[in-house]
Amino acid sequence: MSIVLAILALSFLVFFHELGHFLAAKFFHVGVNEFSIGMGPRLLSFLYKNTRYSLKLLPLGGSCAMLGEDAAGSGDFLAPKQEDNAENVYDFDGVIYSEVELKTKSFEGKPAWQRFIICIAGVFNNFLLGFLIALFLTGTIGVQLPKIAASNVSTPAMESGLQEGDEIRFIKIGNAKGRTVHSYSELAMYLELHKEEIEEGEISLTVLRDGEKLSFQFPAYKDPSTGLYRMGVALSSERVKFQNPLKTIEYSFYELAFNARVVIDSLALISKGKVSRQEVMGPVGTVAVIGESVSSSSQYGFFVMLLVLLNLSMMLSVNLAVMNLLPIPALDGGRLLFILLEMLARKRLNPKWEERINTAGMVFLLALMVLIVGNDVFNLLTGAYSKYFSS
């Protein structure tokens, strides 16, 4: 059951992304040949108002194939049919257009600003879904603020003047770039990213105490039991629920931004070679980890299981949005880049070259997907993901 819930969650995220493209396309009167969830052979399919709706075998993606989008997304073109004293009609696998509609309803024939909105609508939908989930979670279970808790251990941090109840708002380690933090998660992420610099770099904190901002500098604390260097403060595990609705909305945006930052930071680590193959996770690994997380949390009741599933769905929705914004051909980001260049230069790239670039990008993405899925299967068989199952 947990694996089924994981697959349904991923499928819904893809559906919501493609729904953004679909609604924007319909709003600007672009023909949609097929709106599908999944990849591969069709399991179910029906026509409604000149659009084919399909459910496909593999729940690993989806599409909103628009008229004139490109060769891959324009459907199977058949020769025009001549009916009794009627104009030529064109059949795209059951979706019919007149000769006039081929021009008026083509994605490529729309102004650049309309194509831009259609392309970015999927990303917008994923960010919107992520924010709505964050809003529900923030309002329901609150936020763990980066507040300093009481501690009996003497550390340079506490000797510098920090006190219990201080709320950390800014942190900087050594020569690394500082970062404003709003939650425990943001602080923990920064410390994880800069764990190599913490031994020698001085730590600078800005805290909020009784409405006043105070700054402190101190060296890291060496834990005698492990020999590792730490910030040297205990952090409160208390979650805060805001009475002010505006505060709830504000911290929901912070949660959304944090999850986007995690994706960006992860990509930076990958580009620097600081992420091993065992830490790379694709759709198969994601489904397995979500399923295990949901299964483990179910022992605490349905509500806790729901919260875990929603939290994972929020992270994945933001992940999907950010990844789709990457300027890679065949992704939304690649298409948006072409449209932006067109708007700036007031001249469009040759559609044939654009199609070739997008086709090459699609081949690259499919090859990358095969490698990632293969890596997922290998990691599952060798137990490399077990640390996520036990967390």
Image (spheres, grey):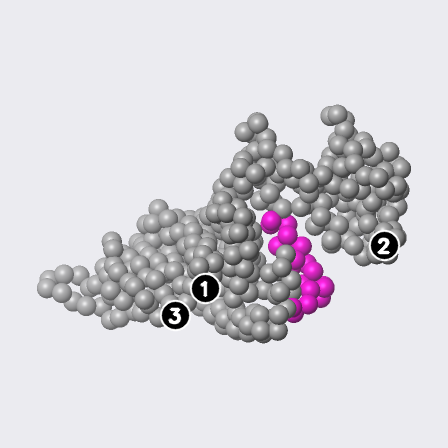
Q: For this rendering, which residue is in front, 88 or 374? A: 374
Who comes first in sequence, dot 1 or dot 2? Answer: 1
Q: Is residue 194 above or below residue 42?
A: above
Disc 1/disc 3 C-alpha distance (Å): 10 Å
Per the image, label 1 sits on a secondary structure element best described as: strand
User: Is there any visible trace of residue 334 in the rendered image?
Assistant: no
Q: Bin the neighbour count of mark 3 within 10 Å (Cα to Cα): few under 14, some 14-19, many 20 and up.
A: some
Question: What secondary structure is the magenta-colored segment mainly?
Answer: helix
Nearest to viewer (mark 3 / mark 2): 2
Q: Which residue is at 58% across, 70% downward?
A: 380
Image-based side of 207 in relation to 28, left or right: right
Q: For this rendering, which residue is in front, 159 or 280? A: 159
Region rendered in magenta: 259-278
Determine contact: label 1, label 2, CB under 8 Å.
no
What is the three-letter code of the residue carrying label 3? Answer: Gly
Q: Is residue 176 above or below residue 239?
A: below
Q: Which mark is residue 225?
A: 2
Q: Is residue 362 above or below residue 202?
A: below
Q: Bin the neighbour count of mark 1 within 10 Å (Cα to Cα): few under 14, some 14-19, many 20 and up.
A: some
Q: Which residue is at 75% across, 32% downward?
A: 165
Q: Bin the neighbour count of mark 2 within 10 Å (Cα to Cα): few under 14, some 14-19, many 20 and up.
A: few
Who comes first in sequence, dot 3 or dot 2? Answer: 3
Image-based side of 135 in relation to 240, left or right: left
Count the numbered circles shown: 3
What is the three-letter code of the residue carrying label 2? Answer: Ser
Nearest to viewer (mark 1 / mark 2): 2
Name the residue that disc number 1 marks.
60
Who comes first in sequence, dot 1 or dot 3? Answer: 3
Q: Position of residue 30 (x, y in %)?
A: 34, 53
Q: Which residue is at 35% across, 58% downward?
A: 35
